[in-house]
Image (cartoon, rainbow, N blue to C red):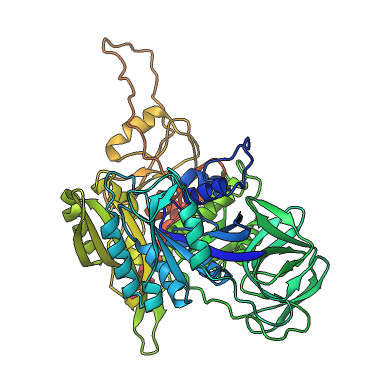
């Protein structure tokens, strides 16, 4: 059967997954009466809750006797490692752009990778039904972006379609016609995207997506570069240096047909397939026939920029809410994650019972922690730290990100001020229509940790921030962190409403009455810059003396709610976030006050020295 392999590239929330839904529906992949979830490609719970694609996934559609393999890629820069590997599996790309927002940083990031690989993109302007749509200006912005990324003449001569994936139509003009549905897009893919290039020689496949299956074990997905593969065929696995990883047999050859996976008797070159039966094979490794000696070249992955320490949960409440609590379980889980996710780097830490995990950004590490807590893990994690580099001449370098913020014009002053305090440099400021402005900064990654919540507060929830790794630059010096101290519990037990009410003038609380606390746990934020130890267990003394005045009614201010991302950004270097399947607690690294004083003294002495 004739084949086409394409990837869909877009920024977060520009409509990739909805577009795939419409293509599946119009191609007849679903039965008339089949119940299909909205955004069918967002398969796991976290993707559905957050409305973002986290893992790259493949589907397949048949149109006019030609099979089109479609790869749905993540739209967030933190998951860019998924995207970089995907692109060498495909021969064309759909660049999907919102008709109002235009191309945003992640679009730029993936398009630059696609253009370097020589792919000729098709540009789809989606959401032209939006009231603030400006399709003509957006096409000009896309052209400028391609030109800035050194696209060649063939790539700059891109075909354009307009439409609305939500309404289910595409056309050569923003005004329609709308009655052909997705047919113009199908026809354009068949005409514009070349068939896979077939190389001579025995079977070779470069692993691109890795997943685990309870029945089949490890499954590696990739495109067959040459030859063919059948179940029970003998193969070997080579790493990128050509060293032998393992030899074995393929137990199953699976291909994508719609949303289903189907077992094949044989798969030939050009097709995207999944292979089971190889327990050690992973991404960026070549699965090939025994006579092959040279591995396929793998796409280099951009380096991680942030790291965190994952530790065993050693608080007094450890083991009360989760069932996976030992350091061995946490270590095995993180090493397993590091095998499948090449954008993560997992290493043993110098401290006992802890692992160092480095990734692309807070969101990527936050998603990993959230996934682990849902699996029943209990752990404690440190504040994210930026990975610095030192040049041979001794200059210290730190990662810089390109930050694009869309906001209402009246809020631009406070955002520029806040980001300049965080050592960011404003490089562009222009109107983006409808009374909104677009600000572009180059900001150190250190300064952006925890800024998302502050931005939403400053812009009354209307600011949208997008970030993209830009490069390394000389260290910008110290950046002011959290200015307030914290309130620390002095005892273990259940918090009492009367005590919390009496402590309200000390600062906002982070716990409710009845919450279990322990010595060294953070229960609130101090109004001053020093830490304060408080007793949240102290009840009201009852006497038999009556007074004419009524007892004061205890009316508590609602506490600060610490969701995971906010907690990671809030803590300081001497604090930890304790994560269990049911709770997120903040605590001091040293629970004993005497140990805390000793650690502070040692830190000051080290700084002086």
Q: Residue furthest bottom?
A: 393
Q: Is residue 299 visible?
A: yes
- When the figure is inspected, residue 94 is found, relative to residue 393, above or below; the finding is above
Q: Residue at x 69, y 59 (%)?
A: 255
Q: Is residue 230 above or below residue 561?
A: below
Nearest the viewer among 177 and 135 is 177
The percent coordinates of residue 224 (x first, y second) are 67, 71
Side of 210 relative to 162 (left or right): right
- On screen, 281 above or below 380? below
User: For the view shown, which residue lies furthest in the right direction?
Assistant: 232
Near-viewer residue (227 or 48): 227
Res 315 visible: no
Residue drawn at 48 percent across, 67 percent down:
192
Q: Which one is in front, 494 or 247?
A: 247
Residue 261, by quadrant, is: bottom right
Q: Position of residue 504 (x, y in %)?
A: 30, 35
- In this picture, residue 541 sits left or right of residue 21: left
* Count of numbered marks: 0
| Image quarter of the C terminus | bottom left
Identify the residue shown where x is 45% and y is 45%: 168
Which quadrant holds the N terminus?
A: bottom right
- The image quadrant that residue 362 belongs to is bottom left
* Image coordinates for residue 495, horizontal then vertical, percent: 45, 33
In this orientation, which residue lies closer to the viewer: 507 or 19? 19
- In this rendering, is residue 550 above or below 103? above
Coordinates of residue 317 in the picture (x, y in percent): 57, 43
């Amino acid at each position: 059967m004739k084949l086409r392999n394409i990837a869909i590239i877009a920024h977060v929330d520009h409509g990739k997954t909805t577009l795939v839904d419409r293509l599946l529906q119009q191609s007849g992949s679903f039965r008339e009466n089949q119940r299909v979830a909205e955004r069918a490609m967002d398969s796991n719970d976290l993707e559905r809750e957050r409305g973002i694609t986290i893992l790259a996934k493949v589907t397949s559609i048949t149109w006019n006797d030609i099979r089109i393999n479609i790869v749905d890629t993540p739209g967030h820069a933190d998951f860019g490692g998924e995207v970089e590997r995907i692109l060498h599996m495909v021969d064309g790309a759909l660049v999907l752009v919102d008709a109002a927002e235009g191309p945003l940083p992640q679009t730029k990031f993936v398009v630059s990778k696609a253009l370097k690989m020589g792919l000729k993109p098709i540009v789809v302007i989606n959401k032209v039904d939006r009231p603030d749509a400006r399709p003509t200006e957006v096409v000009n912005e896309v052209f400028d972006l391609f030109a800035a990324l050194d696209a060649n003449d063939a790539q700059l001569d891109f075909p354009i379609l307009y439409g609305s994936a939500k309404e289910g139509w595409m056309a050569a003009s923003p005004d329609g016609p709308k009655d052909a549905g997705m047919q113009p897009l199908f026809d354009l893919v068949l005409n514009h995207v070349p068939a896979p290039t077939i190389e001579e020689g025995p079977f070779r496949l470069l692993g691109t997506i890795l997943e685990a299956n309870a029945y089949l074990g490890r499954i590696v997905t990739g495109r067959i570069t040459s030859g063919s593969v059948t179940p029970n065929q003998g193969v070997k696995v080579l790493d990128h240096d050509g060293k032998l990883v393992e030899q074995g047999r393929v137990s199953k050859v699976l291909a994508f047909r719609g949303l289903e996976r189907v077992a094949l008797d044989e798969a030939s070159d050009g097709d995207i397939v999944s292979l089971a039966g190889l327990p050690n094979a992973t991404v960026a490794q070549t699965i090939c026939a025994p006579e092959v000696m040279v591995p396929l070249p793998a796409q280099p992955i951009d380096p991680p920029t942030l790291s965190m320490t994952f530790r065993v949960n050693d608080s007094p409440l450890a083991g009360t809410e989760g069932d996976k609590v030992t350091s061995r379980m946490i270590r095995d889980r993180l090493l397993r994650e590091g095998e499948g996710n090449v954008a993560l780097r997992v290493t043993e830490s110098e401290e006992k019972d802890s692992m160092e995990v480095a990734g692309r950004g807070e969101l990527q590490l936050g998603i990993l922690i959230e996934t682990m807590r849902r699996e029943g893990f209990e752990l404690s994690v440190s504040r994210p730290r930026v990975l610095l580099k030192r040049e041979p001449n001794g200059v210290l370098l730190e990662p810089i990100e390109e930050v694009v913020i869309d906001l209402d014009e009246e809020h631009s002053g406070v955002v520029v001020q806040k980001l300049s305090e965080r050592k960011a440099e404003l490089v562009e400021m222009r109107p983006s229509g409808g009374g909104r402005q677009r600000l572009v900064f180059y900001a150190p990654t250190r300064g952006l940790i925890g800024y998302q919540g502050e931005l939403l507060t400053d812009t009354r929830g209307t600011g949208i921030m997008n970030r993209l790794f830009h490069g390394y630059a000389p260290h910008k010096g110290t950046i002011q962190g959290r200015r307030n101290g914290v309130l620390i519990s002095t005892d273990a037990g259940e918090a009492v409403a009367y005590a919390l009410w009496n402590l309200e003038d000390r600062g906002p609380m982070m716990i409710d009455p009845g919450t279990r606390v322990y010595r060294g746990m953070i229960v609130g934020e101090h109004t001053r810059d020093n830490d304060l130890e408080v007793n949240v267990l102290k009840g009201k003394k009852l006497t038999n003396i009556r007074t004419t005045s009524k007892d004061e009614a205890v009316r508590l201010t609602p506490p600060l709610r610490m969701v995971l991302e906010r907690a990671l950004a809030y803590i300081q270097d001497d604090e930890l976030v304790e994560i269990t399947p049911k709770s997120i607690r903040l605590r001091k690294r040293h629970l004993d006050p005497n140990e805390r004083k000793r650690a502070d003294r040692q830190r000051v002495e080290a700084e002086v020295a």
